Amino acid sequence: MKKLVIFAIGSYVLLMFAGMVFAQASAGRMTAERCSACHSTARICEKLGNRTPEVWLQTVERMKSNGAKLSDADVTTVAEYLATAKPGAKLLCGGK
């Protein structure tokens, strides 16, 4: 019984981690796709690691008002991704 509980907990943790990795990759792809419709991702990559989550949210909301094809949920997803992405993020900047 103890082994079954440990296996179940381990499986749950692994699935949660995999879900987080997939969500991050999905957010990165969406960001690259939607933002590059109007300007190069290099412009965004220059700012990674230098802005607060609040500033990213304001920026993405402004881009939506300027015509970026983003739902309200997409705005939140993109802003959260940009706020946590490291400089040189692979999905957005082609880095590691």
Image (spheres, helix red, strand yellow):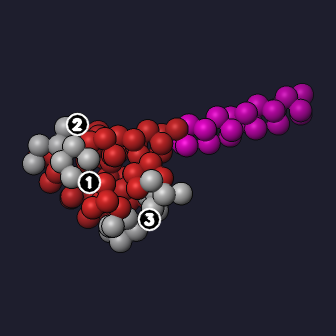
Which one is earlier in the sequence, the residue at label 1 or at label 2? 1
Residue 90: x and y in percent read 48, 53
Label disc, if present, on residue 87 of the rendered structure: 3
Q: Is residue 71 magenta?
A: no
Label disc, if present, on residue 54 of the rendered structure: none
Query: Residue 5 versus residue 46: which sits nearer the camera?
Result: 46
10 lies left or right of 29? right
Q: Are marks 1 and 3 in contact (CB under 8 Å)?
A: no
For label 3, count other residues whose C-alpha is less than 10 Å away and answer few (under 14), some (14-19) or many (20+): some
Mark 1–mark 3 Cα distance, whole angstroms, equals: 15 Å
Q: Say which element carries label 2.
A: loop
Q: Is residue 85 above or below residue 15?
A: below
Q: Nearer the viewer, mark 1 or mark 3?
A: 1
Mark 3–mark 2 Cα distance, whole angstroms, equals: 25 Å
Q: Say which element carries label 1.
A: loop
Taking the spot 53% from the left edge, 57% from the top edge, the residue there is 96
For the record, the magenta segment spans 1-21
As drawn, which residue projects farthest toward the bottom?
A: 50
Residue 62: x and y in percent read 15, 54
For label 1, count other residues whose C-alpha is less than 10 Å away and answer few (under 14), some (14-19) or many (20+): few
Which one is earlier in the sequence, the residue at label 1 or at label 3? 1
User: What residue is shown with label 2?
Assistant: 71
Taking the spot 89% from the left edge, 33% from the top edge, the residue there is 2
Secondary structure mostly taken by the magenta-highlighted segment of the chain: helix
50 lies left or right of 2? left
Taking the spot 45% from the left edge, 53% from the top edge, the residue there is 94
Query: Residue 39 versus residue 20: which sits nearer the camera?
Result: 39
